[in-house]
Each structure stands twice: as structure tokens, then as C-alpha cells.
Image: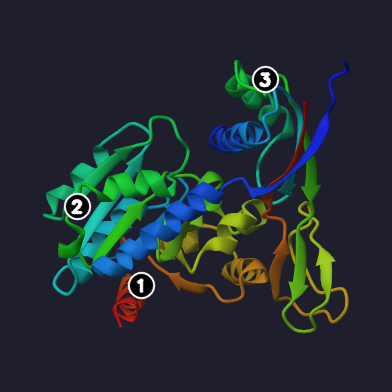
């Protein structure tokens, strides 16, 4: 739902790095995004194509690596992946307790870009 | 000559500009001794009414201002201004959330040094506001009983970023099959430290407890 400001930030960072490395064309951009974000891949690319038109990153492809949401049990420290479709009655597979903290799943990183 | 494609490492956080802006805002707030509360919920959960009730309880002890965010109306700011509280309306112009720079611009319209507490009424939405740090000192959310007890399953991020949850419109409990125990369990699964307060702006239930929570947080921030 909020792809626009996120994509605008991505583009700003890419343009900055493109000028730092004096590249003429960005071919692809590697992102890692947590699965807890509600971003949608198809829309991200559409917004990117729209915003990047005329820039050094025009036509670049977004390569998105989705980072799973991982919970850590507050009781025993066991870590396990959260299944977003089965959020109800989650218990720790190791000790059966029900309190967790979130280890990953909120990532919003730019990893790299392919450019010439 | 063939063009050479190179892989360039970037390793930057996408929303780092917003995070920096939010940290700057928190420093400014510490400096001016103004506590900023970010209040989030779905549309219609009762944010504006609850803010008015909170003002009633606290206005003799704290100097309060309200920052109203709305996609395109000024209705809420007018309600708040009516009770004699400084209110600023930010029209987000279609944006589904507030970010730290929008809040910073909104706060410019206040004289912060004359305010102890500013409440942000964020855009009614359980998705986007959860992703953007507004620079607030504490995040609060309202879930109203008619929305159902399954919302933490659908919007886990929102429930995990809040310091306090107000379960509002508890006067509707008799008319619904809302399972309060199940709600507590679902919320605490992802956020064991969250405070949960059951409220009704209509009957007044829990408004004291909520006002006390807020006043305690404000005092702790000033200490």
C-alpha cells in the first residue's frame, strides 16, 4: 500500500550510488525485504518503472529476496519461522511457551546493484 | 569495446532517511520537553473521540496540542480546536501514513516549548503507519470491539510496534462474540511487553487508566 515512498527512497539511494561509482546505466537492484512488510512485488516494479523514467536506473529490474519472519521464544531462546497464514495459537516448537520477540521480517535493505 | 557490467555493493537501509529524521525529531522533543504520542487505528475505531476524552482528563495538568493527519479533510482538527486545544491539520493528500518529515513540518506550526504533550492522530489505517517511524516517543493504537478479535492475526506488524493497545468500544462486548482472552493472547504473542487497556469513550470505562498511563509516560520522559 505504501510502495510509492519506499520506491522513491530506493531510487534516491540508487541514483546517489550510481553517481558515486560513475556508472551510466543500472541494470538491476538487489533488495532484501521482510515478509512482514505488506509490499507487493509486482507493484514495486511498476512504481519503480514509473519513478525511474529518465534516470540512470530507468528500466532496471528489482531482484527481491524475501526475508522470512523469524520469532525467538522468550522462554528458551529457540528460533523458528513464522507462518503468516497460521498466526493463531503459535507455540514454541521446542518448549510450548507462547511469548516471542521478532528476530527478522521487518527488513528493508538495498544489497547491491548491477550497473555499467 | 564491450560494456562491463559490475556488481556494486550498497548495503543501505531503504528507510534510513526517515529513521534519521525520526531520531532528529526525538532529540528536538527532548530539548523542548515535549512528549509526542503517535496514535494509530483503523478508520472509525474512535481516535478523535478518545483524544477529546483524554484532553478532558489531562488538560488541567498538561499543555496539550493535537496533530491531525487526514487524507483530505479538516473535520477532526475542527472538533479538537472547538475544545480550545491547539490543533494542526496535515492533509496527507492521498498518502496512507505520516512519516517523520511530515510530522516535523506539522510541528512547526506549534510553539513546542509551550506544550507538554502533542498527540498525533495518524491516518486511519493498520498497514502503512506501522512501517514509518514518526519520531514519536510512544506508539499507541486503538482496536475497537466491532472490528473483531482477529486483527492481530491480520496486521501483526502494527500490533508489534505499539507500546500500548486500547481496546475501545467495550460497551459493544455484550452484542458481539469478541473474545477478549483470545485477543490478549494474540497480541502478546508478538509483543509480550505491550500494555493493554480496555476503554469505552461512551461509558468512560478505562479512560482514567489510559490517562494515567499517558501522564506517567510523559512525566517519565521529563524526568
Image quarter where the C terminus of chain B lies is bottom left
Secondary structure of the residue carrying tag 2 is loop
Q: Chain of mark 3?
A: A
At 34% from the left and 81% from the top, the residue drawn is B220
Residue A1 shows in the view: no
Q: How is the image coloured?
A: rainbow
Q: Is residue B100 visible?
A: yes
Who's the residue at 16% across and 52% down the image?
B86
**Whole-percent x, y for residue B84 in the image:** 11, 54
The secondary element bearing badge 3 is classed as loop
- Residue contact at pointers 3 and 2, CB within 8 angstroms: no
Q: Tell me the residue that label 2 is attached to.
A: B110
Side (left or right) of B144 relative to B217: right
* Residue A11: % across, % down: 60, 32
| Residue B200 placement: quadrant | bottom left
Q: Nearer the viewer, residue B73 or B50?
A: B73
Q: Quadrant of residue B50?
A: bottom left
B132 over B50 or under it: above or below? above
Q: CA distance from mark 1 to mark 2?
A: 25 Å
Amino acid at each position: 500500500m505504501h510502495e510509492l515512498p519506499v520506491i522513491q527512497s530506493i531510487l534516491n539511494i540508487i541514483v546517489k550510488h550510481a553517481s558515486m561509482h560513475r556508472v551510466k546505466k543500472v541494470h538491476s537492484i538487489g533488495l532484501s525485504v521482510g515478509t512482514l512488510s505488506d509490499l507487493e512485488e509486482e507493484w514495486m516494479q511498476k512504481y519503480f518503472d514509473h519513478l525511474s523514467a529518465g534516470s540512470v536506473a530507468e528500466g532496471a529490474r528489482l531482484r527481491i529476496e524475501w526475508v522470512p519472519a523469524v520469532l525467538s521464544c522468550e522462554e528458551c531462546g529457540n528460533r523458528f519461522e513464522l507462518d503468516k497464514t497460521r498466526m493463531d495459537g503459535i507455540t514454541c516448537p521446542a518448549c510450548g511457551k507462547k511469548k516471542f520477540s521478532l528476530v527478522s521480517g521487518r527488513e528493508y535493505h538495498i544489497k547491491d546493484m548491477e550497473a555499467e | 569495446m564491450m560494456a562491463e557490467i559490475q556488481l556494486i555493493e550498497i548495503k543501505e537501509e531503504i528507510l534510513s532517511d526517515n529513521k534519521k529524521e525520526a531520531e532528529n525529531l526525538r532529540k528536538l522533543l527532548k530539548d523542548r520537553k515535549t512528549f509526542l504520542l503517535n496514535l494509530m487505528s483503523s478508520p472509525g475505531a474512535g481516535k478523535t473521540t478518545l483524544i477529546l476524552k483524554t484532553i478532558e482528563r489531562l488538560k488541567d495538568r498538561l499543555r496539550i496540542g493535537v496533530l491531525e493527519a487526514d487524507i483530505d479533510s479538516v473535520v477532526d482538527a475542527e472538533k479538537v480546536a472547538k475544545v480550545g486545544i491547539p490543533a494542526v491539520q496535515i492533509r496527507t493528500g492521498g498518502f496512507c501514513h505520516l512519516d517523520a518529515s511530515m510530522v516535523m513540518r506539522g510541528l512547526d506550526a506549534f510553539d513546542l516549548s509551550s506544550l507538554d504533550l502533542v498527540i498525533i492522530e495518524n491516518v486511519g489505517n493498520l498497514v502503512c503507519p506501522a512501517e514509518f517511524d514518526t519520531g514519536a516517543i510512544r506508539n499507541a493504537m486503538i482496536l475497537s470491539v466491532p472490528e473483531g478479535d482477529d486483527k492481530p492475526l491480520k496486521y501483526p506488524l502494527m500490533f508489534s510496534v505499539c507500546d500500548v493497545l486500547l481496546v475501545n468500544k467495550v460497551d459493544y462486548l455484550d452484542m458481539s462474540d469478541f473474545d477478549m482472552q483470545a485477543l490478549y493472547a494474540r497480541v502478546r504473542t508478538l509483543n509480550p511487553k505491550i500494555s493493554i487497556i480496555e476503554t469505552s469513550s461512551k461509558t468512560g470505562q478505562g479512560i482514567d487508566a489510559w490517562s494515567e498511563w499517558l501522564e506517567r509516560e510523559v512525566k517519565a520522559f521529563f524526568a
